[in-house]
Amino acid sequence: MSFPSSLLDPEVAVNPYPFYQRLRTEDPVYWDEKMQVWVISRYADVVALAHDPRMSGIPPQNPTGEPRHQVLQKLTNNLVMFTDQPDHTRLRGLMEKAFNPRVDGVRERVQQVADSLIDAVADRGRMEVMRDLAVPLPLTVQSEFIGVPMSDSMQLTQWQAGLADFVFFTSFTPSTKENDRRTLQNLLALTDYFRPLIEQRRKEPKDDLITALVYAEEEGDYLSQQEALISSIVLTMGSFLSITVALANCVLGLCRNPDQMQKLQDQPALLESAVEELLRYESQVQFSPRRANKDFEMHGQLIRKDQIVIVGLGSSNRDESRFSNPDQLDITRADNRHLAFGYGPHGCIAARLARLHLRIAISTLMRRLKELHLETDDLVWNGAPMFRSIESLPVTFAMK
Ligand code: HEM
């Protein structure tokens, strides 16, 4: 059997970890021919590159000067992930001013919704974790947090899914006109949705994130209309998509390691350490995409200006030179400085909010359910090398 040569190979989508391990050992700076990107796989290199000024946001154009993707170009301006210092510091600072003070306010609501979702499946003895918990929990809480009516949130997730598919998958494969057209349509639908909402909040402020973004101020500086718009879209996308996938991956990690789940049920004080370990063990964001802004050499490879470098978070989290027995889930793991939320200036803006959801959801499951088992081991992974997610997660359980 031949070993895979690309992150796009189907067996890597199911289980990328053996491929990463070989890259870390033999090819720590690897040219993935199919994706046309450099793959960085070692923890120490990923950490070093996070603060390296030779790394920029994803490119608006390829080395020939042509727009790499019309869609990327439209997204590039004002999107926090794609900006560099000093613009990034300013934009992120204003976003944090709006976002951070609101986070702790959702705690009670997360608990309430988690309990009501478990109530709804209690008599059945089975649930599909995505449909019954991981999707509706953040959708309900975060719709209120952001300030969009719950009745619109399913439509928003559909437009966002189209955009996410592009960001995590299609943008690394040869583009088709049809693909670009569909992605642009989704982006347009989202901007058409949020633009009037932002205008309305400017006139009639409410107690929600959109209002907070409109009015966020730092020494007389505010987000421009376009910045508030793109920030609303990206924060909604993170809210609806990222927490869902992380929660499903955490439940999967526990179900596949029943001894660790038992330990957590016996010792609830291990909750925080367990959530960190589950994030390390099955990280949904497998890579941070960057662009080299000048030629440079790394481990004997010449990385050229404007080439894309994808920085391996999932691989770093399984790096044997940083974590002992990295392929083992150990909810008591000490010194667990994983990279599931990224690292450096672009590290996740919402890590505290995400942790809050995950801790409450997992502790509610552990407190109220027992005998939680996967209904099938035949799980379907989404196949996107950048963002690792399962399609559905059916489980059986008994109530305590
Ligand atoms: C468990 C859930 C989550 C995980 C694992 C996660 C992971 C990440 C990672 C790895 C990055 C770094 C990307 C990079 O370096 O290119 C990131 C950045 C980001 N995340 Fe999250 N995220 C989560 C939840 C959220 C949520 C709920 C939101 C929004 C409410 C969010 C919004 C963002 C934003 C805006 C950035 C860009 C920050 C910047 O470029 O300065 N994330 N996230």
Image: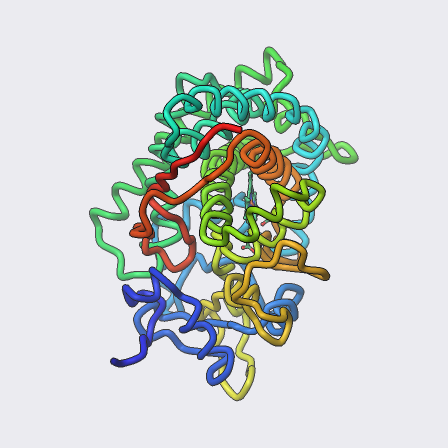
- Quick check: can you spot residue 129? yes
Residue 115 quadrant: top right
Q: Position of residue 23 (x, y in %)?
A: 46, 78
Q: Quadrant of the N terminus?
A: bottom left
- Quick check: can you spot residue 311? no
Q: Is residue 276 above or below residue 115?
A: below
Residue 74 quadrant: top left
Q: Position of residue 89 (x, y in %)?
A: 68, 49
Horizontally, is 69 left or right of 240 in the view? Answer: left
Looking at the image, the residue that sits furthest to the right is: 219
| Residue beneath the point at 45% across and 34% down | 134
Q: Is residue 346 above or below residue 111?
A: below
Q: Nearer the viewer, residue 319 or 104?
A: 319
Looking at the image, the residue that sits furthest to the bottom is: 300
Q: Position of residue 51 (x, y in %)?
A: 67, 65
Q: Is residue 117 above or below residue 5?
A: above
Q: Position of residue 287 (x, y in %)?
A: 49, 60
| Residue beneath the point at 54% across and 50% down | 81
Q: Nearer the viewer, residue 131 or 333?
A: 333
